[in-house]
């Protein structure tokens, strides 16, 4: 057991791009688990400084998806009607996003609401000689880059403005409102080293680091500046984020140093990969969490799956099913793997089926209903059974679910392979014959089933009794009795057992279907 840490404060800081990415969910989950395990604080901050990428409704979607997945947080942004409890209740409406509220002492938690602050910190760095104004126009930067490319040099700002402008010239340009950016003066030939909780000792040489832009001419900070200023002001102790941010970390550390601030501890969690080991991409499948929910995966299964992308409890543990509580108890950043995590959909299917198996029929029914209601076969069935009460319909559906539950891979699949429970049948008479059976034998077989089922009353209509009675009547030639029965009830080659089908369909419908089969002679 690793020791618990005191005063842990972590954050999930997504940039709203339209939806919650499955990788984002994992980052959020690892932060959540680490915070809960250490009785720390988990904050949610919106990093929306890239105005070019603004997507209407993206912030709202993202936050709601997190809530829908059952994660909770203690500080930051919330949907207006968030459902979970938090202790601090002083709530501010977000200035930028209608429908979003902010809670916490260290806000605002939306970066576009903190622009003045970033400006102040960027100017402070300029005043301290750690950063400088750059007025280079795009054309010049482009030419510089082309030249560097030709000479096979890494693309880097050549410090023209730092080397050539006097304080007076800078002031004049600022007064004249010439477009300017603020760049960090990256100290050369230094080594930036840090201890990453996942990757171990990491070191970067600053020679290859560009004088990155901290503050843009449009009045917005870059990701680097805003991220560092916020993590510092929000007292973040551990930055847990995707490995794709690892190259940014030395820049961030240089910024912490320039400000004279303490650096948080970093943990970069492994990339998500497709089966062919390429980086997980939209082109190869769904990446939005909501797509998985729409496909009928349970949120518990998705969380469980995502937790295992890059982590397992280790030490010979074979446990694969984890509730959120179990994850909190067992999660350890030190056990997160360095190697990329392959996104294996078969594993998700397996996990989902395990969770589906464990559900009560009642819960399964509630989960399945919205999916069924979308299906045409169900709508037709439902309107054909107008005289059934809602309770009767529910009872019927729960029977179907009892039969299907063990073989179900996802919620959307319900009924799909057994549409005969909901449909008038259309099949060819030839389906009814078992082996070499002739017409006479087939008629006798169906009549026998008819007789057995007619004798059973309401109370006797149980799976056990139905099976017992039919098997007794079949004697040694089971196929002779059971094949034609199953075929006339389902109209297909493959289906659940005739006993299960009889039980679900009920006495009246089963007898009616036998009658229809007899009518085919
Ligand atoms: N806004 C960044 C993102 O979208 C956050 C990276 C970080 O956690 O520092 O992933």
Image: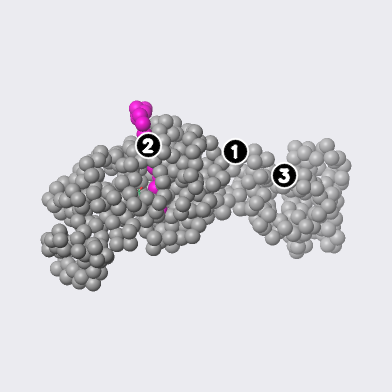
Any mark on residue 9, and which? Answer: 2
Residue 276 is drawn in which quadrant? bottom left
Mark in front: 2 vs 3: 2
| Quarter of the image where the N terminus is located | top left
| Quarter of the image where the C terminus is located | bottom right
Any mark on residue 399, and which? Answer: 3
Label 1, label 3: how many angstroms apart (C-alpha)? 16 Å
Q: Is residue 159 magenta?
A: no
Label 2: element kind: strand
Label 3: element kind: helix
The residue tagged 1 is: 358
Label 1: element kind: helix
Of callouts 2 and 3, which one flags the residue occurring earlier in the amino acid sequence?
2
426 sits left or right of 167 in the view = right
On the image, the x and y values in percent for residue 353 come to: 56, 45
On the image, the x and y values in percent for residue 511 come to: 84, 51
Of 37 and 482, nearer the camera is 37
Q: Is residue 103 above or below residue 95?
A: above
Of 358 and 204, nearer the camera is 204
Image mark count: 3
Mark 2 neighbour class, 10 Å CA radius: few under 14, some 14 to 19, many 20 or more: many
Q: Is residue 142 above or below residue 519?
A: below
On the image, the x and y values in percent for residue 100 come to: 50, 49
Of callouts 1 and 3, which one flags the residue occurring earlier in the amino acid sequence?
1
Label 2, label 1: how many angstroms apart (C-alpha)? 35 Å
Label 1 beta carbon within 8 A of ligand 1: no
Label 3 beta carbon within 8 A of ligand 1: no
Q: Residue at x 52, y 47 (%)?
A: 79
Q: Which residues lie in the magenta part?
A: 1-15
Which secondary structure is most common in the magenta stretch? loop
């Amino acid at each position: 057991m690793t020791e618990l840490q005191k005063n842990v404060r972590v954050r999930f800081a997504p940039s709203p791009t339209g939806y919650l990415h499955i990788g984002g969910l994992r980052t959020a989950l690892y932060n959540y688990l680490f915070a809960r395990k250490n009785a720390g604080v988990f904050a949610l901050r919106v990093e929306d400084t890239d105005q070019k990428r603004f997507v209407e409704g993206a912030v709202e979607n993202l936050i709601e998806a997190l809530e829908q997945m059952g994660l909770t947080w203690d500080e930051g942004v919330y949907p207006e009607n968030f459902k979970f409890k938090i202790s601090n209740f002083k709530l501010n409406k977000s200035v930028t996003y209608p429908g979003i509220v902010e809670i916490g002492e260290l806000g605002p938690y939306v970066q576009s609401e903190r622009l003045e602050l970033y400006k102040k910190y960027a100017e402070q760095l300029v005043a301290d000689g750690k950063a400088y104004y750059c007025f280079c126009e795009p054309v010049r930067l482009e030419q510089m880059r082309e030249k560097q490319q030709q000479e096979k040099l890494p693309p880097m700002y050549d410090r023209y403005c730092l080397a050539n402008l006097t304080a007076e010239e800078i002031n004049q340009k600022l007064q004249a409102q010439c477009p300017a950016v603020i760049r960090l003066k990256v100290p050369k030939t230094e080594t930036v080293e840090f201890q990453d909780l996942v990757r171990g000792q990491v070191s970067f040489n600053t020679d290859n680091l560009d004088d990155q832009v901290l503050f843009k001419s449009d009045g917005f900070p870059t990701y680097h500046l805003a991220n560092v200023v916020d993590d510092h002001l929000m007292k973040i102790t551990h930055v847990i984020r995707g490995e794709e941010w690892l190259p940014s970390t030395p820049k961030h550390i240089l910024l912490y140093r320039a400000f004279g601030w303490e650096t948080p501890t970093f943990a970069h969690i492994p990339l998500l990969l497709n089966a062919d080991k390429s980086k997980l991409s939209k082109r190869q499948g769904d990446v939005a969490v909501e797509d998985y929910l729409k496909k009928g995966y349970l949120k518990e299964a998705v969380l469980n799956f995502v937790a295992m992308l890059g982590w397992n409890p280790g030490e010979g543990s074979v446990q694969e099913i984890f509730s959120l509580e179990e994850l909190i108890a067992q999660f350890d950043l030190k056990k997160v793997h360095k190697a990329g995590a392959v996104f294996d959909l078969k594993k998700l299917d397996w996990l989902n089926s395990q969770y589906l198996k464990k559900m009560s029929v009642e819960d399964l029914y509630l989960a399945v209903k919205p999916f069924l209601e979308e299906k045409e076969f169900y709508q037709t069935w439902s309107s054909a059974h107008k005289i059934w009460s809602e309770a009767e319909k529910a009872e019927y559906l729960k029977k179907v679910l009892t039969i299907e539950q063990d073989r179900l891979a996802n919620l959307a699949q319900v009924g799909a392979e057994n549409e005969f429970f909901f449909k008038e049948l259309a099949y060819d008479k030839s389906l009814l014959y078992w082996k070499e059976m002739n017409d006479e034998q087939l008629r006798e077989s169906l009549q026998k089933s008819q007789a057995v089922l007619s004798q059973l009353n309401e109370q006797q209509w149980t799976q056990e009794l139905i099976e017992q009675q039919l098997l007794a009547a079949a004697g040694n030639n089971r196929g002779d009795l059971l094949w034609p029965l199953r075929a006339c009830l389902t109209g297909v080659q493959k289906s659940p057992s005739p006993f299960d089908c009889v039980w679900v369909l009920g006495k009246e419908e089963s007898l009616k279907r036998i009658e229809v089969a007899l009518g085919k002679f």
